[in-house]
Amino acid sequence: MRCGVYVRVSTDDQRDNGYSIDSQLRMIKEYCEKNDYDIVDVYNDAGHSGKDLMRPEMQRLLKDIKSKKIDKLIAIKVDRLTRNNYDGLWLLNYCEEHDVKIELILEPYDVSTANGEMIFCMNLVFDQRERKEIGARTKRAMEEMAFEKIHPSKAPYGYTRNKETGHLEVEPIEAQVVKEIFELCKKGHSTRNIATIMKDNNAYLKQGKWKSDRVYKILTNSIYIGVFEYGKYKRKPQDVLRVEDYCESIIDITTWNTTRENLEKNKHPNY
């Protein structure tokens, strides 16, 4: 019996349930040896969330199912395959259409039966609920950190992150470069022009190169007026959490407003 083995773990998964990639593989290999199954391929989506099926190895698995490469799909639990109700049912139907049977070694029920399919669906519901609860807990924790002014990630250009408190502190050399960038924008220079000037002046940069998109990110980051916007790139504008007086500002509000106006006025692809 030709088997495809699917394993997945994200940071939250490993912290919460301890099912590392190695432990999943060990359990599945023992299971396959016991049942005299032949492992044809292993699909390893380490570091990917189960919120949807758009994962590199999952996509490869789907192609192999379609091309009749495997007869069985083995995973330890349904939540390794997906934590989404719709995707789970779609995957189940997809496997049935291509004569591939799903076997979950820690959830030993026959998904080809009515009762097995019902249990499969119930587990999907609980797993999706768990994913949403984990997301909600993470969101609350991150928001509390923001209110405490504990920066959750790498310090933005112009700042350093205090290792003891987690607070942002101004880095003098980089802060001076930030001021120069805002002043150039105030005078009407484009982000591309500013990047060229920074490059020609050998403006300090720990890594990478001065490019227009880097300059644009600096000019649109409210951290430089002491305001942290949590969820800016992932939430709807009305849901973004703004924390005032988050850190010491590098530029004044007048400069910020002027540069925002200039950016809006000169908005086009090559600006």
Image: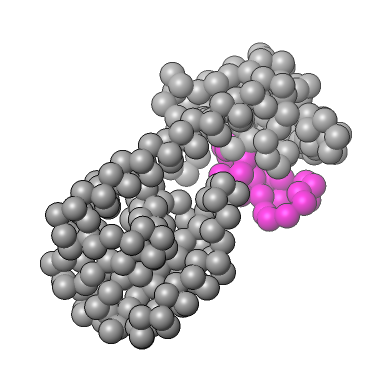
Q: Is residue 199 above or below residue 219?
A: below
Residue 121: image location, x then y, percent: 25, 47
Q: Identify the magenta region.
A: 189-216
User: Was residue 162 drawn as part of the magenta stretch in this picture?
Assistant: no
**Viewer-closest of 40 and 103:** 103
Residue 60: image location, x then y, percent: 34, 71
Residue at the image position 45 percent from the left and 65 percent from the top: 7
**Viewer-closest of 257 and 265:** 257
Q: Is residue 152 left or right of residue 5?
A: right
Residue at the image position 26 percent from the left and 50 percent from the top: 119
**Viewer-closest of 54 and 174:** 54
Q: How many marks?
A: 0
Q: Is residue 270 left or right of residue 37?
A: right
**Quadrant in the rendering for residue 55:** bottom left
Residue 28: image location, x then y, percent: 44, 72
User: Was residue 195 drawn as part of the magenta stretch in this picture?
Assistant: yes
Residue 129: image location, x then y, percent: 38, 37
Residue at the image position 27 percent from the left and 79 percent from the top: 70
**Viewer-closest of 230 and 190:** 230
Q: Is residue 252 above or below residue 86?
A: above
Residue at the image position 33 percent from the left and 61 percent from the top: 108
Quadrant the N terminus occupies: bottom left
Q: Is residue 114 visible?
A: yes
